[in-house]
Amino acid sequence: MRIKHSGRYSTGYAHIKPGGFRVRRGDHVNAGDVIAYVGNTGNSFGCHLHFEVYDNGATINPQTFLRRQGINI
């Protein structure tokens, strides 16, 4: 799943449990909204979230992006 944000950024999410999507194409989401439920799909070991950030389609370091948004992890 990929969510387009305002401007040039989008975020990607993977390993969603089967039937676990809570949003669909065209839905508007806000910070804190549940978009999906974590699963254990694909080549993974245990439930977890695969999170990616894209800048104009190119992957960038998610930690750097989140820090720029004022989020410390």
Image: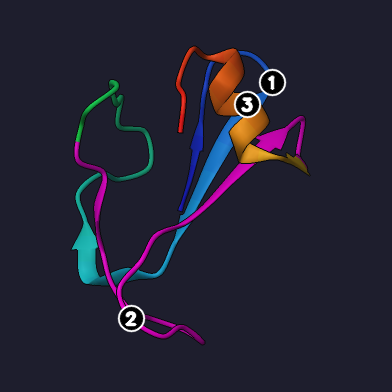
Q: Position of residue 39 (x, y in %)?
A: 28, 72
Query: Label 1: how many residues lie within 10 Å, few (<14), some (14-19) or many (20+)?
Result: few
Q: CA distance from mark 1 to mark 3?
A: 12 Å
Residue appearing at x 38%, y 42% in the figure: 25
Left or right of 49, for residue 56 = right
In the rendered structure, which disc, 1 or 3, sits on the residue that comes first in sequence? 1
Residue designated by label 3: 65
Q: Is residue 64 above or below residue 70?
A: below
Q: CA distance from mark 2 to mark 3?
A: 26 Å
Type of amino acid at the residue the image marks with label 1: Arg
Query: Label 3: how many residues lie within 10 Å, few (<14), some (14-19) or many (20+)?
Result: some
Q: Is residue 44 magenta?
A: yes
Residue designated by label 2: 46
Q: Start and end of the magenta stretch? A: 34-58
Secondary structure under the numbered disc 1 in the rendered image: loop
Q: What numbered label is drawn on residue 22?
A: none
Residue appearing at x 46%, y 24% in the figure: 72
Residue appearing at x 70%, y 40% in the figure: 61
Residue appearing at x 45%, y 21% in the figure: 71
Magenta stretch, overall SS: loop
Q: What numbered label is drawn on residue 8?
A: 1
Q: Position of residue 17 (x, y in %)?
A: 26, 72
